[in-house]
Image (cartoon, coloured by chain):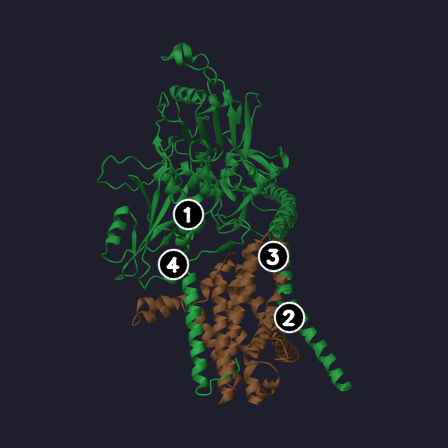
Amino acid sequence: MNAKNTRNPAAGRFIILAATVAMVLAINFIARPVICRVDLTEDKLYTLSDGTRNILASLKQPVTLKFYFTESDPQVPVMLKNFARQVEELLQEYAQASDGKIILEKYDPEPDSDAEDWARRYGVSGQALGAMGPMLYLGLAAVSGTREAVIPLIDPQQEELLEYNIDRLIDKVTEPVRPVIGVLSSLPVLPPPMDNPWMQSKEQGWYAFRDLKEQFALEPVAPTVTNIPDHLETLMIVQPQDLDQAALQAIDQFVLRGGRLLVFADPLCYSAMDQTTGRMNPPSGPFALQPLFDAWGVGYDPQQVVADFDAATTVQSGDGRVESNPIWLTLQRDSLNRTNIITSRLGSMLLPAAGFFTVKPDERRRAVTLASTSPHSTAVNILLAQRGDGAAIRSQYKSGPVESRAVALQLRGLFTSAFPHASATNESAASWLNESAKEGVITLVGDVDLLADPFTVRALNFFGQTAYQPMNDNITFLLNTAETLSGNQNLLDVRTRARMERPFLVVQDLLKQAQQRFLQKEQALQEQLTVTEQRLRELENRKDEGQEFILSAQQKKEIETFRQQEYETRKQLKLVRRNLRKDIEALGLRIKWINVALMPLLVGVAGIVFWRYRRRKMKQA
Amino acid sequence: MPYSSLSAVGLIFRRELKSYFESPVAYVFLIVFLLLSGFLTFFASSFYEAGQADLRAFFFWQPWVYLLLVPAATMRLWSEERRTGTIELLLTLPVTMMQAVLGKFLAAWLFMAIAIALTSPMIFTVLWLGEPDIGAMAGGYLGCLLLAGAWVSVGCVTSAMTRNQVVSFVLALLISLFLLLAGWPPVISMLSRWAPVSLINAVAALSVAPHVESMQRGILDLRDPLYFFSVMAIMLLAAQSVLTNRKSA
């Protein structure tokens, strides 16, 4: 190293430097395609899940994945390029894990190239970058044999669902038969059939069902049905209304034949409400499935919803105030069944106004609760709930029975017919079943709104196209349920690996505690207020004969006292409401002090101490 | 060489580290670093109000804090010695130029590591408030450490190039800024007017951002540490070259 080149030392060193730079760049360049990655996350968010590996292992025929990305265009934003690179690497992992069954092809659909033509033919949609800009493509097509499927645009906002979507794509081209689910609904959840191919219908149905359609064939079942067709193994009923005897019998027999039934029933269905009158449209009568529920031993009251104070959702009320609504349930991990495959990995579900079920124990079948409320919950009449009367709800909480209630459950086993004497009148009397011929599965969910667009997804604009971002795991719940009843079980494992929410548990606890304290105090103050107001009214209305409109001085004084009391009570109520967050904010302040100021302070002190120590040492020297 | 190369490096390393902490500037620096880091995390990003038990808000600001403070921490590494002419004195010690460069670099890197370690109340806070993903946090901190190391190496070169500490600071800031923003759309679009696509891609690949980001998410990819060590290697060799040149001139 010290043997200098005496002729031209500078040049020699420059050459070494240049050579090193070149070598380092070369190493980096060579290393680019090498994927050597360790996933440090606890949830293993970035490695292939077991579900995916199972799907790949069970592939019987090769699948070609064609990845289209306009990489070479310089106007493509770097964030997108990075994302595309991650997608490509994920696809490479698929190829690696598939033992040759997955073939990955990468294409760059430059303008007017063959690749672009093929991209469009497969259905990969292009987005124009700017007014005169070129088209941007970021999509994936899967081809296996004669079947093909496509993800038109891979959405970076839904990064955590990427693995699931790729698995779904592969499943679509390899599964021989798509499971068919019948859908019987009083609400327009499915898009209407295209009578006139030239007329573009505005009605698209609900997003949750469009998503479901990706995996299953959905066949609408009319409420006038007399027999559920044999090819439907799974039947979904959403907000049953006005079902006649024949239809009920059809459903009854369907279950006894071993069918899988999924029922969404809602005592307070916002999606069925007429926007102008605020009333149910059509008006709700007795519960349509009551005879069947009776036969199955299921208790359900269509006039009651459940209020859970631990699961209250923060909503903005009509007058702009933010408040905690216990009727709108945000069910999180503790409320969802941790061991059942449908709910085990769900993060949170939102059920706006849900009914609840009770089950009469029967040795011929098993009941599994999928979602339930906390012990701090009570039943509330739907009129009260609709009015949004917070105080009345809380008072009902105080007086009524307080216990945990099941809002979603699954019954599996043998059932008895609800119409045991129908065989006498029915045409197909010979095949009439009075008891289950095969084990049936009935899944019950006490809410319908949890599937509606306003409560499941947020619509975002991504490069001119509408992208839907899920707000919670409601749709996942729907898909999981449909999957357990009739689909590819492996997809279940993959779907719910979305990025988990990690909230501040300490803060949540504080909020719950504060809310309970608030509850008691507010109750007391509200009662006091009501009493005071009543007295005021009495005073103002009481007039002695002959007094007409003039009040005596004494009456005036009494009124004044009570008015004062009313004012004080209201003030205290406001104070209690404000104190709700006081503890949380105090905690926040403490944390900020510790993190922002404490360490610098300690460093400063250490510095001063060290400085003085050195000064002393120097003086000694 | 009477000294083994490792202990030679160690000698310079200890000497430099000692001189760091003997100066009050180091303490001021640490205080400013911690205040800035904390302020940005808690007030600019509203970490507490956001309610998520992860350190994303914290890691987001770190590169920008380093951008400002690493050049400040490294500007006197070589500039001072050059100005007072003590480089010759340094080299009378039985160490090679490379060992000296390494020694100073490691001392500066350790100093930054100490600064990063002093942000540990964040870790305890987030562990107490909720259940964070520990793997992702570890990855994020590792990313911060490597990033700091890369920029320290940039500071080594710039302080070797000049006697003036301010010049060293500005140069280091500019180079680091370039590395941070290399992939940024305005930069790319400026280049795209005259440069071929391969060059543009190469420049974007120099960017620090994707490497730091993937580590912050909890992925330990071989190529990310490789990138950072490459930067360090190139910069340190450049520093050695510059110093030896100046010395013989």
Rendered residue at 40%/50% (across/down):
A91
B129 lies left or right of A286 = right
In percent of width and height, residue A202 lies at 29, 42
- Closer-to-camera residue (B12/B147): B12
Chain letter for the residue marked with disc 1 in the picture = A
Q: Amino acid at mark 2?
A: Pro
- Closer-to-camera residue (A557/A107): A107
Can you identify the residue that label 1 sits on? A94
Q: Tag 2, which secondary structure?
A: helix
Rendered residue at 41%/9% (across/down):
A424
Looking at the image, do the residues carrying marks 1 and 2 touch, with CB atoms under 8 Å apart? no
Q: Amino acid at mark 3?
A: Val
Looking at the image, do the residues carrying marks 2 and 3 touch, with CB atoms under 8 Å apart? no
Relative height, residue A246 to residue A507 (above, below): above
Q: Are marks 4 and 1 on the same chain?
A: yes
Checking the image for residue B126, the label placed there is 3
Can you identify the residue that label 2 sits on? A600
- Give the crowd class for mark 4: few <14, some 14-19, many >=20 residues within 10 Å: some
Q: CA distance from mark 4 to mark 2?
A: 39 Å
Checking the image for residue A80, the label placed there is 4
Colour of chain B in the image: brown
